[in-house]
Image (cartoon, grey):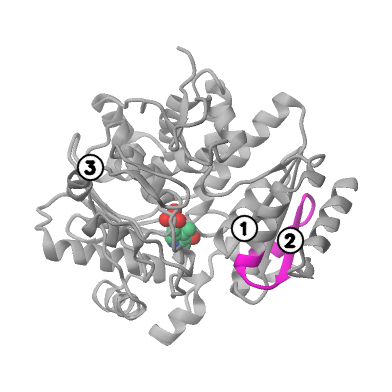
Amino acid sequence: MPPLLFRSTNGQSPAVNLRGAFHAGLAPDRGLYLPEKFPQMPPDEIAAFATLPYPEIAFRVLSKFTEGIISDNDLAAMCRDAYDFPIPLEQIHDRIFLMRLDQGPTASFKDFAAQMMARMFGHFLRDDGQQVTILTATSGDTGSAVAHAFHGVPGVRVIVLFPLAEVSVSQRKLMTTLTGNVRIVAIDGKFDDCQAMVKRAFADQELKHIPLSSANSINIGRLLPQSVYYFYAASRLAKSGEPMVFSIPSGNFGDAMGAVVARQMGLPVKKLVVPVNDNDAFPRFLASGVYEKVVPSRNSVSNAMNVGHPSNLARLVANYGGQMDETGKIHRQPDLAAMRRDLFSSSVSDDRTRAALKEFWDKYQLLLEPHGAVAWQGFLDWQAVEPPGDAPAVIVETANPAKFPEEIQKMMKWEPDIPPQMEAALKSPEDFDRMGADYEKFKAYLIQKHAM
Ligand SMILES: *Cc1c(COP(=O)(O)O)cnc(C)c1O
């Protein structure tokens, strides 16, 4: 079979294979890549997942996309290597479960995508004999997940920019205790400054001799691995063919798009609940059909979801027959009735997030962090308007509570245990560079690092 092709949501760029989509990140017309046709996972193949370990399920799902691009042997080895940590499914009550995606090397769900993406990148670079510098700006979880995943990958140098005053100590240390091919740069500025500097570097003609690449959330390589854990949860909790409910706390909607990919491949889904924090552009759009981004984005306790204009909405809209460009302008309305049938979204304020976290502990003795608390409250909001029946449901917990000790301390009056993989990072010596939000200085830094 010829390799699967990927098309841009803006419809103005040629279709490319996985390797092309991977290297480009953003399509030349500034749209996002989606598979031309979703490969299908027949019911008997899904049923067979019930007894398979996670890396094997990952292999069977991802191989549908990598056929003709990465050999089965190589992909299977990457899956075993990337996914060597547990994925706990804890019962909340009846058939409602908490899926903790926080056991990877940097204790957030970003590890699932970053770990696989780094291995695929390394594989392609080995083939091409190339060197590349991965340049990324982070507000917290992405930077550490990407830095860890690409740490020690031959042919890759990683440079991460973060706003010195805006990340938590544990988020910082998960980046700054890495050495070797990873360089971390603290910027005396805001996340927006870091992002602007990275964007300028990508567009700078005088840096064209440095092969720069990004590992940001719009890359199809980050999206596909995020479909696997939905198959996994269903394999452990649902009867064969039984539709599931998932509640996914959303910022850029990459995690939620992973669930949409799984559903398009054939996973039976009754409802996707996609709650947000105060950045409520999506629930307002779902209700009214009018899209207005939140400018500037609003700060909240679920800080990884402070996104005023979620980039993956372009993919979601395309999935329902519509077209939204990168600025958020809608050129063709999606099938809103179908979207409302499949999706539910509410906005969860900080007050409701904190109350949900506390009540969840009091009622079930299970600890959430702010993002997971948004998922739980969003699920309750959905239950209040639609009888859930007895469909199995999964609340997605996207980070480890130990990443938010200050917030947990405030609510619970005690601090969460620190998982072993974080403990090591918190103890190791830190090493990072520091500069002002000055593009020319940063440019000189890039040129100097490249010459080394
Ligand atoms: C990134 C992140 C999210 C939001 O995921 P999106 O794919 O951007 O919707 C939620 N929780 C945590 C902890 C995150 O790091």
Q: Amino acid at mark 2?
A: Ile
Q: Earlier in the sequence, mark 2 or mark 3?
A: 2
Q: Secondary structure at mark 3?
A: loop
Q: Of discs 1 and 3, which sits in the foreground?
A: 3
Q: Amino acid at mark 3?
A: Asp
In the drawing, does residue 404 fall left or right of residue 231? right
State if disc 1 and disc 2 touch (CB < 8 Å): yes
Residue 134 placement (x, y as % from top left) = 69, 46
For label 1, the residue is 143
For label 3, the residue is 335
Q: Is 290 in front, or is 450?
A: 290
Residue 150 placement (x, y as % from top left) = 67, 46
Q: What span is colored magenta in the figure? A: 173-193
State if disc 3 and disc 2 touch (CB < 8 Å): no
The numbered disc on residue 52 is none
Whole-angstrom CA distance, mark 2 to mark 3, is 44 Å
Residue 372 placement (x, y as % from top left) = 37, 65
Residue 422 placement (x, y as % from top left) = 59, 64
Which class describes the residues within 10 Å of circle 1: few (<14), some (14-19), or many (20+)? many
For label 2, the residue is 184
Residue 346 in view here: yes
Q: Earlier in the sequence, mark 2 or mark 1?
A: 1
Whole-angstrom CA distance, mark 1 to mark 3, is 35 Å
Residue 258 in view here: no
Residue 452 belongs to the span the image colors magenta: no
